[in-house]
Image (cartoon, helix red, strand yellow):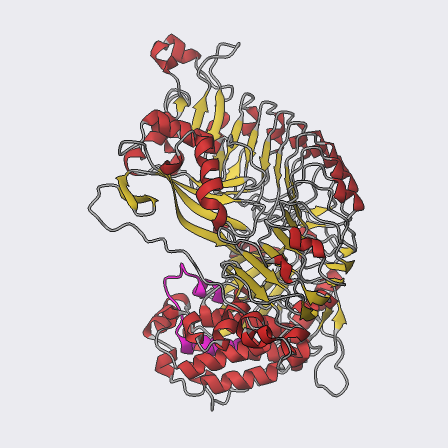
């Protein structure tokens, strides 16, 4: 609330309240009214008060990128004048209010990157003016309402990364203005792609990645403007349609399906193509080299990924131009010696050819400058005070961005802002998972050092009102930040209130008294609410079953409420698929982590107690221990030991203040491997984790690794015949992209080797510090390429300090072995543990446990004396088997 401290003084329209912008003239009622609430990235917390619905003349409500919680007020549906509703990048919960469907003038609805649940209201079909519907990255469920096909002006429908189910509505093809349909990472299991989707009149981008779709690919050749097609990671069958796609095609992504037949000859006529990805299918025949032969790639790039298919021949020369990358690994053609080019360029086309950067952009020299040296063109730097904008393309229709930067993108930005092209510099381009390029735009004044006040206001308004020139190719943009710094730092306060010179005509006293808001309740705009810790929740109440479970304690709701100060938001430490996680302190001063189930994850009490019974049997030093549970008054909560040093992913983050040495990482790997081995071979019944990742490996006060997030939903089947491992079980695919076993994804048959694959990715993260998806490629590809070229040390995390090159190589080879495509070629966890023990064997205790680690332990754990000594982790210890012998699994 510090950023809104001036809201308590004077009148909102004449006292320069932060983020309040009023109309420059009075309305028919004789009053001035609020036109815009511009509160982006002000570090606001609390809830959005229902009284905001009384701002009946409001046109823009912008609270993007804050920490607001609670439900979206249904009262917003009363603001009939609202044009932009921008709520993205917060922590809103609950469902979307159907009342928002009353907003007949709404142009843009952005609720993405929140924690929204429930379904998309049917009433959204009444949003007759809506052009941009962005609901991605939430937990929205249910089917896509057919009513959305009635929106005549809808341009972008972006609903990816939710839990949508059902079928794809064929009626969406009737949308006359739709250019982007992005539904990736939902669960339309068993649904097919309607043939009607071949009749979209203006579609530019169709992205249905990882949606559980089956059936064949429809003929999309009649979509004249189609540029981007992503149908990867589905269960599509049949052949690829032969008809020629649009000349505008830049991206064809059909990997990880069950496609057969050959590559259509028409693909050779797509001169704008940047990506053709067909990996992990059952395609056969010859590789059509005409795709890249006799074509100029001077100002473009092309990546052709045909790995893991059945290609046995090529129609021409496999040698590619410098800007073309060809992947053929895992095809019969890579085993032949009859094609000279295969032998000559085996390392490049049948290995993992590494992308090389051609960027020769050198920064400006540190010449003395009171503001900033900005590079406006090659070799030309200006000392100036630029406006800096944190900017991201949300759904572009290309694969490689760099070919379009200097001409098309530069012209798009500067023409929209009425600037000249040399007034734009692009700094620090970041390709976030390849799908959404993020960059820092710097706008440079023309002929002077700084922009004047009116120019700053005009440019900022242009960005924050989304009134750029229309572009289908670059798609919608996200404004992540527009900080006013340096000479512009005080402009924000000066530009709030009434912007025009009308104030020169307002006489203090009588006129000011008439300048009132349509609602004074804006003072209540952000408010903090605390749950009543003793109030019954609205969750369903189950019939109580009297049952005692040995080894765990049954807590009352009141005990856990008291431990978390009424589940206060200050005790919230995480959120998962089960629900929110709170840090609590029990009456005996024990610190615990409390998982509080949300209504959508609740089971019957019998099922819940069965799960507790199973979890109570799992005892291993490298598993997070279950302490107790609560099933009072319809609640379902699990109480675990608290892990003060968080998860491994946070320690590997580039933003981490402390990091782990190679020795420490090796022991973290060994500890977590032992925990997984216990689940596979010693638990009764065996458990397949199914979501192994660095964020599910937690560290105690001495940085001992413990695996978290395992339960009944991952029970393994009975043991197979003679192999000592459980057989497979058919299951709906669950897991985290980047860690997901491709074989499990394709067949839906879960085995313990699926966990091995995920653990291999974890090992690669420990080795490199990278995320699984890194700068447009996967970590497996990066490390495999480096390993094959003998340069694995080049991808090792430099923050690990000095380490043995041999041990780094051994860890890399073990990780890649775990990540083999075929499950039967991966090692069992018992072998993984043995290999890691060999890597860790020569590590000395002082090398692993630094003074920093001991200090962390003494600070974070009041009872650190009860934690086993670091020596107990080392080979030769009587605990080296990894089990607490005093507690035997039941």
**Is residue 252 found inside the magenta-colored segment of the image?**
no
Which residue appears farthest toward the left when viewing the image?
A: 368
Q: Main secondary structure of the magenta part?
A: helix
Q: Which residues are magenta?
A: 647-672
> In this picture, is 729 found above or below 27?
below
Residue 636 shown left or right of residue 728 in the figure = left
Quadrant, the C terminus: bottom right
Residue 211 quadrant = bottom right
Of residues 338 and 48, the one nearer the viewer is: 338
Residue 158 image offset from top left, x and y in percent: 63, 43
Question: Foreground residue, 212 or 258?
Answer: 258
Residue at 58% x, 56% y is 294
| Image quadrant containing the N terminus | top left
Q: Nearer the viewer, residue 645 or 318?
A: 318
Q: Residue 351, how many percent across, how many down?
A: 56, 73
Asked if residue 881 shows in the view, the reply is: yes
Q: Quadrant of residue 112?
A: top right
Q: Specify whether residue 665 is painted magenta.
A: yes
């Amino acid at each position: 609330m510090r950023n809104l401290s001036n809201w308590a003084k004077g009148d909102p329209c004449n006292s320069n309240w932060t983020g309040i912008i009023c109309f420059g003239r009075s309305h028919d009622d004789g009053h001035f009214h609020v036109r815009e609430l511009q509160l982006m990235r002000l570090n606001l917390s609390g809830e959005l008060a229902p009284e905001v619905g009384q701002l009946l003349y409001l046109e823009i409500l912008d609270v993007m990128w804050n920490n607001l919680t609670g439900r979206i007020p249904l009262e917003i549906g009363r603001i009939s004048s609202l044009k932009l509703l921008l709520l993205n990048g917060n922590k809103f919960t609950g469902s979307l209010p159907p009342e928002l469907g009353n907003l007949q003038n709404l142009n843009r609805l952005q609720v993405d990157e929140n924690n929204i649940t429930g379904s998309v209201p049917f009433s959204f079909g009444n949003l007759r003016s809506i052009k941009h519907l962005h609901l991605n990255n939430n937990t929205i469920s249910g089917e896509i309402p057919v009513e959305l096909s009635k929106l005549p002006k809808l341009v972008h429908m972006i609903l990816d990364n939710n839990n949508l189910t059902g079928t794809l509505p064929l009626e969406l093809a009737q949308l006359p203005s739709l250019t982007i349909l992005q539904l990736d990472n939902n669960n339309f299991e068993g649904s097919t792609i309607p043939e009607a989707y071949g009749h979209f009149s203006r579609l530019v981008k169709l992205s249905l990645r990882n949606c559980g779709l089956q059936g064949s690919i429809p003929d999309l050749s009649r979509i004249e403007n189609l540029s981007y097609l992503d149908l990867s990671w589905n269960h599509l069958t049949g052949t690829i349609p032969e008809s020629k796609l649009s000349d505008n095609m830049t991206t064809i992504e059909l990997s990880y399906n069950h496609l057969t037949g050959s590559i259509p000859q028409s693909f050779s006529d797509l001169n704008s193509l940047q990506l053709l990805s067909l990996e992990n299918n059952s395609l056969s025949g010859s590789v059509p080299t005409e795709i890249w032969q006799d074509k100029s790639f001077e100002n473009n790039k092309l990546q052709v990924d045909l790995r893991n298919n059945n290609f046995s021949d090529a129609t021409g020369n496999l040698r590619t131009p410098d800007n073309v990358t060809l992947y053929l690994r895992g095809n019969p053609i890579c085993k032949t010696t009859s094609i000279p080019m295969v032998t000559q360029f085996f390392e490049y086309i049948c290995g993992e050819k590494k992308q090389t950067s051609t960027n020769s952009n050198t920064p400006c020299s540190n010449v003395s400058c009171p503001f900033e040296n900005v590079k406006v063109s090659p070799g030309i730097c200006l000392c100036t005070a630029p406006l800096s904008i944190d900017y991201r393309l949300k759904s572009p229709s290309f694969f490689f961005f760099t070919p379009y930067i200097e001409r098309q993108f530069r012209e798009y930005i500067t023409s929209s802002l009425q600037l000249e092209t040399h007034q734009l510099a692009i700094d620090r381009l970041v390709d976030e998972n390849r799908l959404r390029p993020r960059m820092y735009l710097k706008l440079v004044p023309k002929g002077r050092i700084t922009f004047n006040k009116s120019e700053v206001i005009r440019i900022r308004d242009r960005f924050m009102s989304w009134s750029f020139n229309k572009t289908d190719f670059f798609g919608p943009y996200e404004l992540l930040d527009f900080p006013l710094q340096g000479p512009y730092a005080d402009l924000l306060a000066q530009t709030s209130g009434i912007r025009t010179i009308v104030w020169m005509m307002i006489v203090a006293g009588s006129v000011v008294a008439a300048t009132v808001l349509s609602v004074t309740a804006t003072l209540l705009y952000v408010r903090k609410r605390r749950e009543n810790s003793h109030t019954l929740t609205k969750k369903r109440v189950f019939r109580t079953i009297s049952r005692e479970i040995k080894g765990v304690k049954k807590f009352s709701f009141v005990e856990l409420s008291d431990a978390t100060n009424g589940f206060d938001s200050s005790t919230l430490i995480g959120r998962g698929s089960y629900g929110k996680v709170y840090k609590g302190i029990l009456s005996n001063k024990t610190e615990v982590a409390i998982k509080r189930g949300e209504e959508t994850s609740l089971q019957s009490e019998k099922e819940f107690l069965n799960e507790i019974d199973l979890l109570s049997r799992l005892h291993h030093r490298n598993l997070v221990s279950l302490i107790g549970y609560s099933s009072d008054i319809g609640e379902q909560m699990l109480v675990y030991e608290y892990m003060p040093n968080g998860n491994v992913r946070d320690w590997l983050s580039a933003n981490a203040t402390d990091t782990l040495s190679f020795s420490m990482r090796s022991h973290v790997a060994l500890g977590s491997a032992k925990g997984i081995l216990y689940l596979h071979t010693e638990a009764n019944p065996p458990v397949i984790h199914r979501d192994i990742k660095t964020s599910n490996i937690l560290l105690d006060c001495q940085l001992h690794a413990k695996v978290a997030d395992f339960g009944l939903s991952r029970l393994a089947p009975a043991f197979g015949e003679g192999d000592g491992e459980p057989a497979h079980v058919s299951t709906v695919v669950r897991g985290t992209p980047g860690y997901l076993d491709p074989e499990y994804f394709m067949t839906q048959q879960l085995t313990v080797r699926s966990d091995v694959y995920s653990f291999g990715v974890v090992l690669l993260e420990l080795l490199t510090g990278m995320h699984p998806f890194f700068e447009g490629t996967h970590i497996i590809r990066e490390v495999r390429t480096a390993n094959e070229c003998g340069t694995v040390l080049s991808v090792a995390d430099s923050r690990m300090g000095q380490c043995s090159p041999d041990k780094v190589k051994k860890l890399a080879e073990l990780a890649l072995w775990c990540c083999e495509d075929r499950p039967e070629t991966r090692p069992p966890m018992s072998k993984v543990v043995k290999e890691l023990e060999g890597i860790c064997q020569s590590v000395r205790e002082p090398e692993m446990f630094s003074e920093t680690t001991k200090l962390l332990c003494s600070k974070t754990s009041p009872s650190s004396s009860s934690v086993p000594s670091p020596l107990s982790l080392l080979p030769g210890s009587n605990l080296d088997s990894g089990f607490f012998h005093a507690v035997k699994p039941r």
